Structures are given as C-alpha cells and as structure tokens.
Image (cartoon, grey):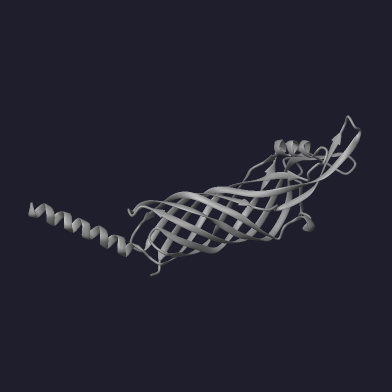
Amino acid sequence: MKKNLLLVSILFLSINIFGQNDFHRWQIGASFSPDYAYRTLSAEKNVDGASNIISYLNTEDMEKLSFTTGISLNYNFSSLFGLETGLFFSNKGYTSNPNISLHDQFGGWISTGRWLYTLNYIDIPLKANFHFGKRRLNYLATIGIAANFLQSHNREWLTKDSPYLLIQTELNDDFVNKANISSIIGLGLEYKLSNKFTLRAIPTFRYALSESFKDDAQYVDVNAGKILYTQISRNLWNIGIEFGIFYGIK
C-alpha cells in the first residue's frame, strides 16, 4: 500500500513539474503553409448580364497552388490562451482553364493556353490561440485577422503552343487594393518535442474581407443585340496546412 502511494505521488509530482516547466510566456517560431488558392466573385448590383458573366468565369477559372510563410512572436497569458503576431509573405491568386483560346483585338486566333493571376503580399497577423490539453500532443484553435500589404501583382499568359508565347501584364493599379484585411481561422495539433520546442500542424483558412482587385467584364446579349459592361470584384482566399516550429524564450 505504501509503495503504491509513493508511486502515485511521484507520478503526480512529475506531471506538475512537466506542466510548470512546459509553459512559456514568450515564444518565437517559423512556419510554412502550402496553400490552395482561389477567389470569390461579385458584381455591381442591378447590372444586366452580371450573373451570366460570373457563371461564365466560374466555369473558366481554376484554383492554383500557392504558399504562406513567415516568422511569429507569441505571448501566452496561460497554458490555455495566448496572442500571436508576426511577419509573413503570402502568394495568392488563381489560374484559368488551360484550354482557352487567345485572340487579338481583331478577333484573330493567337494561341491556346491559360491565364495565371499572381498577387504577393506582406501579412501582419493578430491571432488568438486556444490550447486544449496538457499532454505532449494537444489541440490548438486559432482565430484572428491579418493586415495584407500588396507587394506585386501580374497576369501571365502561359501557352501550350509552339513557338512559346508569354504575355505578362500588371493588373490595372486603379482596380487593385494595395492594403486589405483578411480573416484567419484554423484548428489543428501541437506536439511538444521538449520543454522548449513545439511543433504545429494547423489546417488554416484565410479570406480577404474586402475586394482584392476588380476589372472590367462584358457580356454579349445575343437576344437584345447589345454588349453589357460591368466590373467584377475578386476576394482572394487561401486554404492550407500551416507547419511550424516554436521555441520558448522564457
């Protein structure tokens, strides 16, 4: 009986010691997220043909692979809750169907290929982190926002034809938001490698809360015999798995 009580006491003490040493007010970390990037579309209200343009673009546009990477600084109020900020680089955008035919201004065929939209940002996030569990492998939920500052933007034509044709243009500056706010939400796992080091794997979704850019679009109404014009707005989003490693400072 005494031996059992001694074993239980040692186990309880070791758990407490692990929990106390395991908690760090400050952490620094680095992470990388391979992402799946796309956009949502919206048009000016009460514009004839806008829904037809959006339906057409939704059949022509496709997702593209992208990424988000950077460094983080965490302040933990307790072992269960903390705040996180940092400095990140994010690649966003989308592509189109690879079998689009490109024509010149006179309607003549040029080549077959796809458009690739690429927008690069510097992101500064502010997230609330919620930790569930006090074992080596625990759950982690995160929610917050990020300020997105546009660094570059372009649209490339990638052809499958020979000879190789590449057309690269910048999106219209007047139609591109240089700064934006995006929402962030994620739920994943964290694993304590040691008293100082923690690994994370968090499926994360990021969505631009206002339009990332817009451009002119037209719709040919065959029945009415006229061309309808409108502007289509794009809100970019990314979804991926954020892999990170964090070091406890104090």
Q: How many labels, in total?
A: 0
Task: Give the residue drawn at x 56%, y 60%.
Answer: 125
Image coords of residue 192 (percent x, y): 36, 56
Q: Is residue 31 left or right of residue 231?
A: left
What residue occupies the far top of the structure in this picture? 223
x 72%, y 40%: residue: 160
Q: Residue furthest left?
A: 1
Please give the name of the residue rendered at 8% of the width and 55% of the height, measured from the top-left corner.
Answer: 2
Residue 39 percent location from the top left of the image: 66, 46
Given residues 108 and 19, the one toward you in this image is 19
Which x, y percent locates residue 238? 59, 49
On screen, residue 208 above or below 57: below
The image position of residue 21, as x and y in percent, is: 31, 64
* Screen quadrant of the C terminus: bottom left
| Position of residue 8 in the picture relative to residue 219 (left or right) | left
Q: Residue furthest front?
A: 46
Q: Is residue 249 left or right of residue 54?
A: left
Residue closer to the observer: 116 or 128: 128
Front one among 128 and 89: 128
